[in-house]
Amino acid sequence: MNIFCSGIGGIGLSAYAAYQKASGHTVSGSDRAESDLTKALQKEGITVSLKQDGSAVPLDTELFVYTLALPSDHPERLQAAKLKIPQKTYFEALGDLVRESGKPLIAVCGTHGKSSTTAMAAKVFIDVGRDPSVILGTKTKDLQGRNFRKGGGSEWIAEACEYHRSFLHLSPTIILLTNADGDHFDAFKDLTDYQKAFQEFIAKLPKDGILITHCSDSGLQGIIQFARERGVKVIDADAFPLPALSIPGHHMQSNAQLVLALADVLGIPHAENALKGYAGSWRRTEVKGETKEGVLVIDDYGHHPAEVRATLQGLRERYPERRILCVFQPHTHDRTIKLYSDFLSAFSDSDIVILSDVYDARPQSDAEKVDMPKFVSDSAKGSKVEVVQGGSLDNTLKILQTMLHKNDLVLTMGAGDIGRIADALL
């Protein structure tokens, strides 16, 4: 089949594209900018165009798969319609791919921790030779630095995103639910609507389906009750020990508990040993290296206040002797405004915070703009730390470089392109 992927540089769609290429299909695609992901796809033999005016869509395309960020009037979608090519969102296409394989799907969902939990589960399965197929929202050493795996075993493991209820296109047999704190309020009316989406996902489980989650989490009680009322078997991950990991943070151990519970359900041995060897993944508290001056540089994808708080807590515990400079790039005006009060106290385990300009990923859903000077001032009061306005990434880097001392720890954090600063330091 000839497949064209529009927005192929996205972390999910790039995994789908690479998987289909590895399956023998002809795959090409486009994105608005070159990235490490697009370069990796090109090495796999996938043609990637940086023109998105419709001209890159081959005339013989049989399936057009696009990211949700692509509006209906985008030139490539209009071109696909003109050529009468079937169009599917990434998750529609992924759901079809898994169902057509005939293999059961283990889906990992939740507000935070999806990628790490999926990566941990993949490692446990790989270590015992179960040879799973994997679609992941990050890259990991256990997948040879990739975000996908084409396995010959009898299971799929995939990260399932709730944004715009995308995960409802999947048909899971087991669901791992990390938490449901609330996010993406450009796509959900409120927290109730957000958590209802997870209930709808659980409703897709078959009669013998299983939900694995943290039953002590107060924010999950309504979802757990819904699952039990439907007759879904609920496994409490909190009944399992917090395993020893090589990466910092209680939140990572909580993710690993879900994987221990999964291994127990499926009778997979030596899961704790496999988890102990989990080396982390791309942009998930990823140690990038140390500068010649002795500054430790860590990069993280966290962009929700709960993620910021948990990551900084973990680093403070692991590196008590280091001064922590958190360089945070807010991700979308809408998220920052709707979770504003939660952000203000999230930085308290750092010593200095530099807030860069907002990464404007979805300008069409950002009705208001963040008042950055106020955000800086309010965060300083709420977190009781020094907070500096950085402006552009180039200017943020310049400010950061004037502040660095030997043995400092720099954490670059956000879902945008803030990782450029970590790379520049090294």
Image (spheres, rainbow, N blue to C red):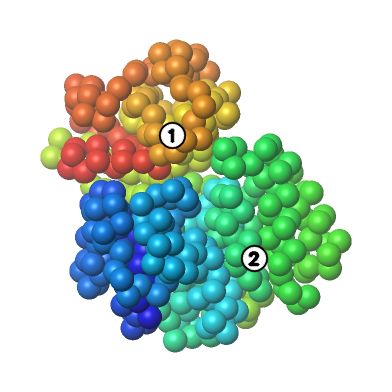
- In this view, 417 is above or below 199: above
Name the residue nearer the viewer: 347 or 243: 347
Whole-angstrom CA distance, mark 1 to mark 2, is 32 Å
Q: For this view, does 218 lie left or right of residue 61?
A: right
- In this view, 29 is above or below 113: below
Query: Quadrant location of the N terminus?
Result: bottom left
Q: For this view, does 357 lie left or right of residue 338?
A: left
**View extreme (right): residue:** 229
Residue 185 appears at what percent x and percent y?
A: 59, 37
Residue in view at x 21 percent, y 29 percent: 394
State the image quarter where residue 104 is shown. bottom right
Residue in view at x 76 percent, y 53 percent: 223
Earlier in the chain: of badge 1 and badge 2, it is 2
Mark 1: few, some, or many residues within 10 Å (few <14, many ≥20)?
Answer: few
Element carrying mark 1: helix
- In this view, 1 is above or below 251: below
Residue 249 appears at what percent x and percent y?
A: 48, 46
Q: For mark 1, what is the residue?
A: 363
Q: For mark 2, what is the residue?
A: 175
Residue in view at x 52 percent, y 27 percent: 367
Residue 319 appears at what percent x and percent y?
A: 37, 39
Residue 155 appears at what percent x and percent y?
A: 54, 80
Residue in view at x 58 percent, y 50 percent: 164
Q: Examine the rendering and report whether any part of residue 194 can be seen.
A: yes
Name the residue nearer the viewer: 399 or 98: 98
- In this view, 292 is above or below 231: above
Identified by mark 1, the residue type is Pro
Element carrying mark 2: strand
Q: For this view, does 185 lie left or right of residue 201?
A: left
